[in-house]
Amino acid sequence: MSLQYILLLTFIGGAFSAWGLMRMSQISSKERTQTINDKVASMGGHTLSVDIVDRKECPFSREYQDRDRVYKFYQISYELSDTVKHGWAVQSMAQQSYGPSSAIHSQWTWRL
């Protein structure tokens, strides 16, 4: 009977961990989208769409080759002065070797 309880608790703990990771991923995604929206708004524009794209689809991805960093590429469509424009944002992330565990330093490059 005690083995069943251990297995049940293990299952519940695993499900809770998976839920927590998915929740944190959603929060991070919303924060990144909000950062892009804020940047476009600071230029006086309005964001139409933000799409995360594969490295191969970004025309200048060869500039980002540092193995100590992880890159996320975003294709942005926005409206500025009644014209639809397209641009790119690249988020470069690196984990710090000091400070709190799992602290990630993030840097944005804008091509709008």
Image (cartoon, rainbow, N blue to C red):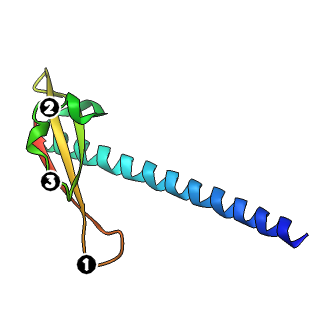
Count of marks, rendered view = 3
Specify whether residue 43 is in view: no
Disc 2 crowd rating (10 Å Cα; few below 14, some 14-19, many 20+) is few
Q: Image point 14% across, 48% down: which residue? A: 65
- What residue is disc 1 on? 98
Q: Position of residue 107 (x, y in %)?
A: 17, 56
Taking 108 as reference, is 72 left or right?
Answer: right
Residues tagged 3 and 1 counted as in contact (Cβ below 8 A):
no
Disc nearer the start of the sequence (2/1): 2
| Image disc number at residue 80 | none
Q: Residue at x 14, y 44 (%)?
A: 42
At x 31% / y 69%, what residue is drawn? Answer: 103
Q: Which mark is residue 66?
A: 3
How far apart, in angstroms, are the residues tagged by discs 2 and 1?
34 Å
> Residue 15 location in percent, x, y?
65, 56
Position of 18 compared to 44: left or right? right
